[in-house]
Image (cartoon, rainbow, N blue to C red):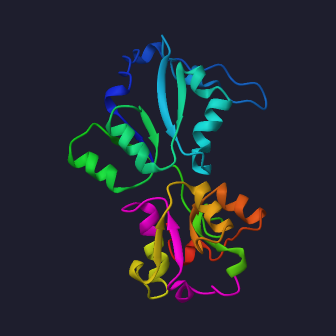
Amino acid sequence: MILALPGCSRKEAEKPPASAITDPEPASPGTGPKLSDLIEPLSPPVKVTVGLKQVISDSGVLIGVAKDYYKELGIEIEMAQFATGQDMINALAAGQLDVGCTVTASGLFNAMIRDLPVKVVADKGINVPDMGYYRLVIRADLKDTIKDFGDLKGRKLAIVGTASLDEIALDRCLAAGGLTLEDVDVQVIRSFPDIIAAMSNKSIDGGMVIEPFVTQAIELGIADPWKDPKEYDPD
């Protein structure tokens, strides 16, 4: 989810009369039109501070920066890294960020209730069947023990924050086995890399993790991808 502070956005420039609008020059074979041919760049350039979590769903912003898409339009992106979406929402509410690539959490709804100028702009990621980017993973050494949802009972499972998308997803996963959050030992670990580290030292049995940390943990032999999210948390 992408959030923005309306007060930080630049006012839309007056549109030229229809007679003044011309089509951009045809692009050469193999290339598309420049963004600046389609949208008038901001002048002078405007700096926009964007909150990120170093996760795969941030790639849209990162690709745009790498390919100078924003720069071409007069937008200077200043990136700020956060461990959790809740921390990012707090920074947005405090006016420390212009845009936050964050998640649905209680802090977002609290900000709206308090009439803070935070606006939901767009979704930035969904779980596609058989290609889930956000999921429950379990320790690789437990894959032959934790085979079904009911086997999660009594296990230590980590999330990065309560009253958030992470807790909702875990609750749905447990519900698929007739369990609730009361049936497991929920551990709050405030970053995805730290969840993987806790799995590595066997202090937890599994956790809700997002890419690229899912793939990294699997390649290191720490985690098993377990069940596809389509079985417990379909979009």
Q: Is residue 15 above or below residue 87?
A: above
Q: How many marks?
A: 0
Splitting the image into 4 quarters, where does residue 25 fall?
A: top right
Q: Residue at x 37, y 56 (%)?
A: 105
Residue 12: horizontal and vertical position, in percent?
A: 37, 22
Residue 128 visible from this viewpoint: yes
Residue ID at (32%, 35%): 94
* Residue 121 position within the rendered picture, expressed as x and y whole percent measured from the top left: 40, 42
Asked if residue 121 shows in the view, the reply is no
Work out whether 82 lies above or below 162. above
| Viewer-nearest residue: 21 or 13 | 13
Of residues 220 and 128, the one drawn nearer to the viewer in this rendering: 220
**Magenta run includes residue 144:** yes
Residue 228, by quadrant, is bottom right
Magenta segment includes 61: no
Query: What is the residue that sits farthest to the left in this orientation?
Result: 114
Vertical comparison of 222 with 175: above or below = above
Which of the 4 image quarters holds residue 15?
top left
**Residue 30 position within the rendered picture, expressed as x and y whole percent measured from the top left:** 78, 32
On screen, residue 158 versus residue 197, left or right, reads left
**As drawn, which residue projects farthest toward the top?**
44
Residue ID at (48%, 11%): 43
- Give the image location of residue 170, x and y in percent: 47, 72
Q: Which residues are magenta?
A: 143-169
Residue at image point 68% right, 81% down: 142
